[in-house]
């Protein structure tokens, strides 16, 4: 039955929608009256593409979009329909706009395009001579432009000439090229067009590529100024002191290592310099500047090359990478100096240096923190500015050797030395060998011992040049038997203790678990409260965790001490695997410190929870709470009863007041009625007496006179018999 109702509902919905679908009927409207047999173009635009379009010709025949003489091009939001050789007469549009509120339709008569033929271009001296012919199936007047560009597609172009001509007549033009720049890749385009009914009809023709050399090319600028700020990686080009009065614009091009990074045409009335940034690591920058005069002619470029490394024969300064020095002087290196003047500013102090050849120069630093600027102009008239902040650092770096190896005696052929220094230092030993540092500054170095005394010197140098030295003396030879036996016994004892630690920890944990279970079972048997059991377990956990933490801390400290001893070095040399396992065990011991600390925190939390449970389950506290609750409920009930009593009294007073007011209103109404009745009776009596008096008085006719002439009037007359005036 339910399924039957469902299908019946679907059927009813379908029948309700059916009239809506059937209501989407086609509409017919006049489209266009064609004066003669001619092709027409129909433009249709809409929002939704569920539009249906067809036509009826003047003889009322249906013409669809699939008809032989109909072409259609659809696009997003519309379509263009071409009806070829449309018959003369009234055409109609048949459409269904679908879900659109409206559609827009526009019709235009098709026009055959104009055509440019016979384009011929020649360059003779500073003149361009061209011939072309524009044809059309009808006589047309048209506009044209002669364009000059550097690509056949005329993405950018310059209009040399424009005009107005008629079709069917050969056109010959001679155009001056005096204001055109020299170039070997020009193209000429002729663009012809006319407008009709809001539509532009056009054609274009492009010549072959040709070259032109102008005799009016302006001279290039004599020079331009370049300033390089190496640290900021900025290049400033200024032409203010080198342009002529008739120079209107300048084209500045900059390339870095062969890649163009700047190309801009600037208006010289607005700016006369540009700033260009370049990437780090660039070695060669090339700059070129061309100027353009008021006639649009561009000069040949003036160029400069800038070397940003020491290659080449020009003067060059190299600053050290370090920003701190150990003394009161800052030194830098230079090359290819020939009576070169270098200017510098340190804070507020200025000075200059005269340099020759290759070498190093020094500048005095007056303060602990110094802002230094060095500038010079090389032989190519390129100015360089170098900025640097330099601090004086007299603090030597730290250098720590972890093991107590100084003065030790060993029979080993090699000794492993570990330590740490500052991360930005260079660490070497006395023979010049550089020791590689880890990211945190730690290092490990295996030194090969010779028989007898061995002296190992470490040197750590920071970027400022401060140095810290550390030396070790290690003897290679036979150990005394007593010392060797003590060392062996010590190592064996340590290994035995270390091997038993996991068993000790396991036994302690097992005892703790057993003890906690006994407390739980004993508490249940003795019917102890949950708070009491939880409290006892918390106390046992606290004692166990605290004892384990103390033991683990002592054990961890002893292991760390062993790691820093010569015995661990011997262990590492004898058995690297055992040494690695030793380090892993130490790390696990450290982890246990955190675990036991967490257990102490857990025991404290358990104790607090037991106190809360006990307080919540205490009979006296519970009774006091119940009593307080009962008192609160009684007070609440009493307050409710008092509110009800006050409310009843207020209602009673309101009812009594309402009854009193109603009685007073009824009394006033009765009084008003009686007074009105008396007044009505008095008025009736007075009117009766007046009527009786009037009836007893004899009626007298009063004569009437004309207001115009004063003549006595006859009773009931409408006009005066003497003057003829109408009476009112």
Image (cartoon, helix red, strand yellow):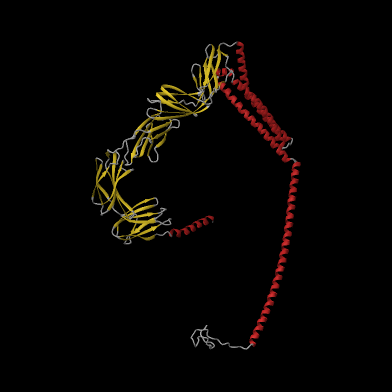
Q: Nearer the viewer, residue 453 or 84?
A: 453
Q: Is residue 96 above or below residue 375?
A: below
Direction front: furthest residue: 709
Q: Quadrant of the N terminus?
A: bottom right
Residue 100 position within the rendered picture, expressed as x and y whole percent measured from the top left: 43, 55
Tell me if 505 is positioned left or right of 444 in this view.
right
The percent position of residue 605, horizontal first and vertical second, equals: 67, 35
Quadrant hosting residue 397 = top right
- Looking at the image, residue 239 sits to the left or right of residue 326; the answer is left
Classify 664 as above or below 201. below
Q: Is residue 581 shown above or below 636?
A: above
| Residue 132 in the figure: left or right of residue 409 | left
**Residue 525 shows in this picture:** yes
Left or right: where 159 falls relative to 608: left
**Horizontal and vertical percent position of residue 352:** 44, 26
Image point 64% across, 87% down: which residue?
Answer: 697
Q: Nearer the viewer, residue 262 or 275?
A: 275
Residue lying at 58% horizontally and 22% vertically, measured from the top left: 582
Mark count: 0
Question: Which of the pair 328/566 is nearer the observer?
Answer: 328
Q: Residue at x 39, y 56 (%)?
A: 104
Q: Image quarter for residue 625?
A: top right
Q: Between 401 and 373, which is closer to the camera in this rendering?
A: 373
Residue 122: x and y in percent read 24, 42
Residue 120 makes an appearance in the image = no
């Amino acid at each position: 039955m339910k399924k039957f109702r469902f299908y019946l509902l679907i059927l009813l919905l379908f029948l309700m929608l059916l009239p809506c679908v059937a209501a989407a009927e086609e509409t017919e409207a006049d489209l266009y009256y064609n004066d003669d047999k001619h092709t027409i173009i129909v433009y249709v635009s809409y929002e939704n593409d569920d539009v249906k379009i067809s036509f009826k010709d003047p003889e009322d025949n249906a013409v669809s979009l699939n008809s032989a003489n109909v072409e259609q091009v659809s696009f997003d939001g519309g379509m263009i329909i071409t009806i070829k050789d449309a018959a003369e007469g009234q055409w109609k549009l048949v459409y269904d706009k679908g879900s659109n509120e409206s559609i827009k339709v526009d019709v235009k008569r098709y026009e055959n395009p104009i055509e440019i033929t016979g384009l011929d271009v020649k360059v003779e001296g500073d003149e361009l001579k061209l011939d072309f012919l524009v044809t059309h199936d009808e006589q047309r007047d048209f506009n044209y432009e002669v364009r000059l560009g550097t690509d056949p597609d005329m993405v950018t172009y310059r209009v040399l000439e424009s005009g107005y001509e008629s079709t069917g007549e050969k056109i010959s033009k001679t155009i001056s090229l005096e204001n055109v720049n020299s170039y070997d890749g020009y193209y000429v385009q002729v663009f012809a067009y006319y407008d009709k009914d809001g539509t532009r009809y056009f054609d274009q023709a492009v010549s072959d590529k040709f070259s032109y050399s102008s005799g009016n090319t302006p001279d290039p600028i004599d020079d331009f100024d370049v300033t390089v700020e190496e640290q900021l990686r900025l290049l400033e080009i200024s032409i203010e002191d080198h342009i002529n009065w008739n120079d209107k614009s300048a084209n500045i091009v900059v390339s870095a290592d062969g890649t163009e990074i700047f190309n801009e045409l600037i208006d010289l009335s607005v700016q006369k310099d540009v700033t260009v940034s370049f990437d780090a690591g660039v070695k060669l920058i090339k700059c070129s500047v061309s100027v353009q005069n008021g006639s649009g002619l561009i000069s040949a470029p003036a160029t400069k090359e800038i070397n940003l490394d020491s290659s080449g024969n020009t003067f060059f300064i190299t600053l050290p990478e370090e920003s701190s020095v150990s003394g009161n002087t800052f030194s830098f290196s230079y090359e290819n100096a020939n009576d070169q003047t270098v200017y510098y500013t340190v804070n507020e102090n200025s000075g200059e240096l005269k340099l020759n050849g290759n070498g190093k120069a020094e500048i005095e630093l007056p303060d602990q923190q110094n802002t230094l600027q060095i500038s010079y102009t090389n032989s190519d008239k390129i100015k360089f500015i170098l900025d640097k902040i330099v601090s004086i650092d007299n603090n030597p770096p730290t250098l720590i050797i972890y093991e107590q190896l100084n003065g030790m005696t060993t029979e080993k052929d090699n000794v492993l030395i570990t330590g740490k220094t500052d991360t930005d230092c260079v660490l070497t030993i006395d023979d010049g060998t550089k020791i590689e540092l880890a990211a945190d500054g730690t290092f490990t170095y295996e030194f090969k011992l010779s028989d007898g005394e061995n002296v190992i010197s470490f040197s750590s140098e920071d970027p400022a040049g401060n140095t810290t030295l550390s030396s070790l003396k290690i003897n290679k030879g036979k150990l005394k038997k007593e010392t060797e036996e003590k060392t062996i016994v010590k190592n064996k004892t340590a290994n035995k203790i270390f091997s038993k630690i996991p068993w000790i920890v396991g036994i302690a944990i097992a005892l703790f678990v057993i003890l906690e279970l006994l407390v739980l079972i004993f508490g249940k048997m003795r019917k102890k409260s949950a708070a009491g059991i939880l409290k006892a377990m918390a106390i046992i956990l606290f004692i166990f965790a605290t004892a384990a933490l103390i033991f683990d801390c002592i054990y961890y400290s002893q292991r760390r001490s062993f790691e820093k001893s010569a015995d661990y070095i011997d262990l590492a040399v004898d058995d690297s695997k055992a040494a690695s396992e030793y380090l892993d065990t130490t790390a696990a011991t450290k982890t246990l410190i955190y675990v036991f600390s967490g257990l102490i925190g857990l025991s404290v939390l358990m104790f607090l929870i037991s106190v809360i449970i006990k307080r919540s389950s205490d009979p006296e506290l519970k009774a006091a709470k119940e009593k307080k609750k009962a008192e609160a409920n009684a007070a609440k009930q009493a307050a409710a009863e008092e509110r009800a009593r006050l409310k009843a009294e207020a209602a009673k007073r309101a009812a009594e007041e309402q009854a009193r007011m109603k009685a007073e209103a009824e009394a006033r109404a009765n009084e008003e009625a009686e007074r009105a009745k008396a007044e009505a009776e008095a008025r009736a009596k007075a009117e009766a007496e007046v009527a009786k008096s009037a009836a007893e008085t004899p009626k007298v006719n009063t004569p009437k006179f004309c207001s115009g002439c004063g003549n006595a009037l006859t009773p009931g007359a409408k006009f005066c018999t003497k003057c003829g005036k109408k009476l009112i």
